[in-house]
Amino acid sequence: MTALRPAEKLLMELGITHPEEIDLEAIAWTLGAAVRFRPLDKSEATIVGSEKRAIITVNCTSLPVRQRFSLGHEIGHWHHHRGRVLFCGPRDIGNPAHRSLDPEHQADRFASDLILPGYMFGPRIVKMKRLSLSDIGEIAEEFNASRTATLIRLVESNRFPIMAVCHGQQKRSWFQRAPMIPNWWFPNEELDHESIAFELLFGGASESNYPRTIGADAWFHFRGADRYEVKEQSFLLPGDEVLTLLILPEEGLE
Ligand SMILES: [Zn+2]
């Protein structure tokens, strides 16, 4: 068993054992931070506070799962960066492109552990029978999380040979792969015209119900990629981005 991270330790200390018990406003309160929901223009959430007390403001015009992640992120700032005033813009919260020492990354890590704690998430994914976006969506609903956050957690769990790859209209914005996947599985910068992600982003296609099989060379350029097939399933994100779940073949991992 891996060591508990700060957010997971906090949940354990509060005796929380089920996802529906993770009440972020109550948790913030026990830590000395009051939460209010207001329309915010240039920010998803802010925190102002002294050493002991803080006020977190969350943008109430965003989607509920987004608000929840933003609140988790600010509680993360409160834990890690107490005493600072922080305005977190839309690109600051829930952005896997941040580097690991970046305070925004630390706050995202905290939010993810708080909303999808390993000691509840691990046992849940053991019960997964299939790997598709609808299965991921089911778990996301149980944990009151976004599909994106849930997919990233699933990739990190290293239970499946999967990657999450996000593209904007110009190029790839970030990707994350399960630690078991060798480095040569490095996704292309640009979307292939044959990919579902391309159809969704540029062709107005709708989301498919199941992952589809495609030649691995549509997604990867390493020598011999054309010998493999991968499964892909994509969904659109706000801001003209598309997120793809890629399932790699077991034989390609050796
Ligand atoms: Zn932040």
Image (spheres, rainbow, N blue to C red):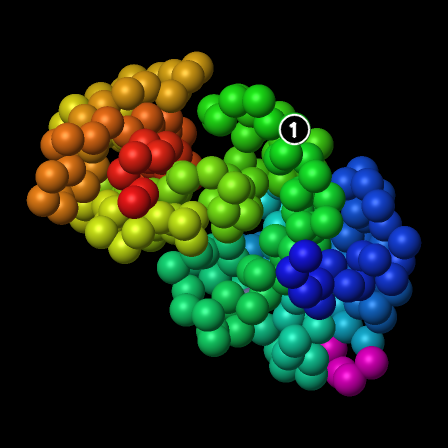
- Mark 1 surroundings: few (<14), some (14-19) or many (≥20) residues within 10 A: few
Residue 15 located left or right of residue 3: right
- Is the stretch drawn in magenta largely helix, strand or loop? loop
Residue 192 located left or right of residue 78: left
Residue at 49% in and 26% down = 131
Q: Position of residue 99 (x, y in %)?
A: 41, 69
State yes or no: residue 146 in magenta. no
- Compared to residue 247, the image places residue 69 above or below, namely below
Q: Please, what secondary structure does the residue beneath circle 1 have?
A: loop
Residue at 66% in and 43% down = 122
Q: Position of residue 193 (x, y in %)?
A: 14, 28
In the figure, residue 62 lies in which quadrant? top right
Q: Magenta region: which residues?
A: 48-52
- Compared to residue 190, the image places residue 246 above or below, namely above
- Compared to residue 85, the image places residue 163 above or below, namely above
Q: Is residue 14 visible?
A: yes
Residue 113 located left or right of residue 189: right
Q: Quadrant of ligand 1?
A: bottom right
Give the residue at mark 1.
Answer: 127
Q: Nearer the viewer, residue 125 or 238?
A: 125
Q: Position of residue 155 (x, y in %)?
A: 47, 45
Q: Amino acid at mark 1?
A: Lys
State yes or no: residue 51 in magenta. yes
Residue at 23% in and 23% down = 214
